[in-house]
Amino acid sequence: MSYVIAISGKGGVGKSTIAGLLISRLIANQCRPVLAVDADPNICLDGVLGIFINSTIGGVREEAREIAGKGMSGGISKQQLLEMKIEESIVETDDFDLIAMGRPEGPGCYCYANNVLKNALTRLSDQYPYVVLDNEAGLENLSRRIIQRVDLLVMVSDPSKRGLDTVRRLHSLSTDMGIQARELAIIVNRMRGETLSETARNLQSSTNADYLLGLPDNEELADAAEQGHAVTTISESNPVVRLLDRFIREDLKLIAEEDQSKPSESR
């Protein structure tokens, strides 16, 4: 069974960067392969990981509908055609694969694209020992149960009191929505000092978070983002990388399993 990490928080706090770093560090610690899921309609996780995705769930749904409507599906059902197109949309690398929800083409809400992604992940996720889900701002994707089971819910904030208060509200909302995760981690990103604030520590206490992790504001990461470089280019000695490595090894105690192989043969 796969270990599922879901990342949430308000916009602009570095969720996708942290998602990319966690994927990168899981791989570096031999916890692989990873299924990376970009559940934000505004796709950016591919750039963070240094790859390019040119097909999304929203797009293939429209493509499959068009093919079926023109009678060009070759005798297979519309659902089978959609599943085939979804498989083709996955970007595969040696250590991780990426699937993205994207925007639905044409007018309409995201409900159908969410449901298609949910069904795809139900089929795909157990083929991977690790799944990392990068959500859009807020909790909408989680509330729609795109992932049925979450082992670690990561809520990301900047160090401001306003940002931390937002995490407090999101946590309260997640409880009201019945969103369940086995463990909760709060990551305070881009800290300018070395010590977590009293507000952050009180937040951990009030939310019963299992982990509270502070990541320093970092010039190398800022430069990589500014120049569009992938997080995989960040040095092993980077303090943020070292903190995340320790989090994975010592706190989460994620140990690489032997003989993990890419699931491509089963797909």
Image (spheres, rainbow, N blue to C red):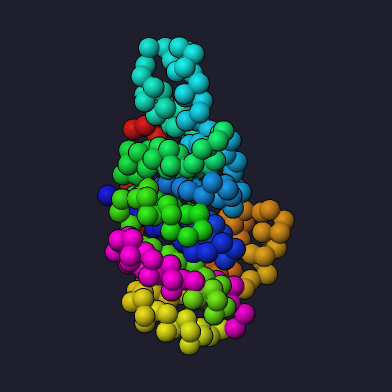
Q: As displayed, is residue 39 above or below residue 138?
A: above
Q: Is residue 203 magenta?
A: no
* Residue 171 in picture, x, y percent from top left: 39, 69
- Which residue is situated farthest in the right direction here? 227
Q: Is residue 175 magenta?
A: yes
Residue at coordinates 52% horizontally, 64% vertically from top-left?
A: 10
Q: How many marks?
A: 0
> Which image quadrant for residue 140?
bottom left
* Residue 200 in picture, x, y percent from top left: 47, 81
- Which residue is situated farthest in the front direction here? 108
Looking at the image, residue 227 sits to the left or right of residue 127; the answer is right
Q: As displayed, is residue 182 above or below residue 43?
A: below
* Residue 64 in picture, x, y percent from top left: 47, 24
* Residue 109 in picture, x, y percent from top left: 49, 41
The span shown in magenta is: 166-193
Residue at coordinates 45% horizontally, 12% vertically from top-left?
A: 71
> Which image quadrant for residue 115?
top left
Q: As displayed, is residue 249 above or below residue 33?
A: below
Residue at coordinates 36% horizontally, 24% vertically from top-left?
A: 80
187 and 171: which one is in front? 171
> Which image quadrant for residue 159?
bottom right
Residue at coordinates 37% horizontally, 55% vertically from top-left?
A: 143
**Where's the C terminus, which quadrant?**
top left
Determine if residue 55 is in view: no
- Which residue is situated farthest in the left direction here? 1
136 and 249: which one is in front? 136
Determine if residue 233 is in view: yes
